[in-house]
């Protein structure tokens, strides 16, 4: 069972998300918070697995809440769920340790999928935020010209940048989910990258998607 905390200043949205999650037997909402401070305090009491965090909230925003949660409970995954995908908001989320960043306009099924994917240890960033990530993540990265990338490597990077999880990638490429997992691990090792987020940034910076 995945324990989820919903942090958003709009009560009806919190209630709506809780209703959505109640339809999935693998997810249980253990609390609701109206700002980042409340989210952190609820984490102390209920130890959720995943926090759905809005970035713009009164008094204590999502940046504050994410920093506090990741500093004290690094194993708790923070998935930003917000309306904004501007570069400054994305930069703040990434800088304070968010494990994922998706928009409220996503379908309910994709939000549920994102929660499960983040809980499994895979970073999730919606396709529309990658242009912002490209501007804000300036860490040195290898050049694509330095590696012999196969067409399959490029297909994997494209689908990851589209926000697909391993199950969705497997379905699109007609592969076993385990094969997709192994191929991504091999690609990360080839490029000397740590995770899917770095892989997506690499792909964007090198104009591979």
Image: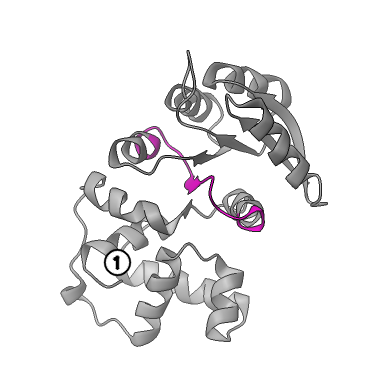
Residue 180 highlighted magenta (yes or no): no
- Residue 189 placement, left or right of 139: right
Farthest top residue?
A: 59
Residue 168 lies, with reference to residue 152, above or below; the image says above
Residue 27 percent location from the top left of the image: 76, 46
Q: Position of residue 191 (x, y in %)?
A: 30, 68
Quadrant assignment for the C terminus: bottom left
Residue holding disc 1: 203
In the foreground, 47 or 82: 82
Relative to 88, residue 114 above or below: below
| Residue bounds of the magenta highlight | 93-110
Residue 21 position, x and y percent, is: 75, 45
Mark 1 lies on a secondary structure that is helix
Q: Residues within 10 Å of mark 1 (few under 14, many from 20)?
A: many
- At horizontal 66% and vertical 26% (from top left) the residue drawn is 11
**Residue in the picture at 30% in, 58% down:** 201
Q: Quadrant of residue 31?
A: top right
Q: x%, y% of residue 167?
A: 61, 71
Residue in the foreground of this view, choosing between 70 and 83: 83
Front in this rendered view, residue 111 or 47: 111
Q: Residue at x 45, y 22 (%)?
A: 64
User: Where is 107 relative to 10, above or below?
Assistant: below
Q: Quadrant of residue 205?
A: bottom left
Is residue 195 at all visible to an observer of this figure?
no
Residue 94 is covered by the magenta coloring? yes
């Amino acid at each position: 069972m995945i324990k989820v905390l919903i942090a958003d200043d709009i009560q009806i949205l919190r209630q709506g998300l809780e209703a959505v999650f109640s339809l999935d037997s693998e997810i249980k909402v253990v609390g609701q918070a109206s700002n980042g401070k409340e989210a952190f305090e609820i984490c102390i009491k209920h130890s959720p697995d995943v926090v759905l965090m809005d970035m713009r909230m009164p008094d204590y925003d999502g940046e504050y809440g994410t920093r506090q949660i990741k500093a004290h409970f690094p194993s708790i995954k923070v998935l930003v769920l917000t309306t904004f995908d501007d570069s400054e908001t994305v930069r703040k989320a990434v800088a304070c340790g968010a494990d994922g960043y998706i928009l409220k306009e996503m379908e309910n099924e994709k939000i549920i999928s994102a929660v499960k994917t983040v809980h499994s240890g895979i970073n999730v960033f919606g396709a529309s935020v990658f242009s912002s990530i490209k501007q804000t993540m300036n860490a040195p990265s290898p050049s694509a010209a330095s590696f012999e990338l196969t067409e399959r490597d490029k297909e994997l990077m494209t689908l990851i940048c589209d926000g697909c999880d391993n199950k969705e990638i497997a379905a699109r490429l007609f592969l076993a989910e385990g094969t997709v997992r192994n191929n991504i691990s091999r690609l990360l090792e080839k490029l000397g990258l740590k995770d899917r987020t770095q892989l997506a940034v690499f792909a964007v910076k090198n104009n591979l998607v």
